[in-house]
Image (cartoon, rainbow, N blue to C red):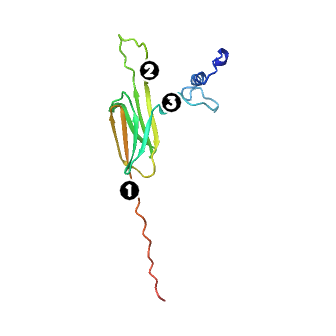
Amino acid sequence: MEGRVFGLETPLMTALQHLLDIPDGDAGNSGGEKQGPTRAYVRDARAMASTPADVKELPGAYAFVVDMPGLGSGDIKVQVEDERVLVISGERQREEKEDAKYLRMERRMGKLMRKFVLPENANMEKISAVCRDGVLTVSVEKLPPPEPKKPKTIQVQVA
């Protein structure tokens, strides 16, 4: 049912309606008709949009600083995909206690993710990650600048 019936034609209601219409994978895709984004794609897109990060260029390295609240170092994954894409991800689970009842839940739960395309001068062999107080810092060292080519001197022969 559309939100217009109840006079709820707000951007939030439109987005919620769109999410409810998203199929899981390619189930039911027959005849080659075009499908919208999958739930996994939407989940990753929302995780990337809601994970704050800073990117700094230092003299000898690039630093990626990402807030990962409530995650330990074992819950965070730092990977390099497609040779130049740095992927930082993790998932924060809700604490389940049988005798506790939530009166209000405001802290963010679920997947945290960011992807960064690394520049050409990033050294893919020199990547390190440190998580301190819920803030992950990934350092990617820079490759040394290429040596300037010396001009080739050609000896002139007298004929």
Q: Amino acid at mark 1?
A: Pro
Q: Residue at x 41, y 34 (%)?
A: 89
The CA distance from mark 2 to mark 1 is 46 Å
The residue labelled by disc 2 is: 106
Q: Which residue is mark 3?
A: 46
Q: Earlier in the sequence, mark 1 or mark 3?
A: 3
Q: Secondary structure at mark 2?
A: loop
- For badge 2, the amino acid type reads Glu
Vertical placement of residue 57 versus 112, above or below: below
Q: Are marks 1 and 3 in contact (CB under 8 Å)?
A: no
**Residue 21 placed where, x, y %?**
59, 23
Give the image quarter of residue 106. Answer: top left
Instruction: Say if mark 3 contacts mark 2, CB within 8 Å.
Output: no
Q: CA distance from mark 1 to mark 3?
A: 36 Å
Q: Which residue is mark 1?
A: 144
Q: Is residue 73 left or right of residue 151?
A: left
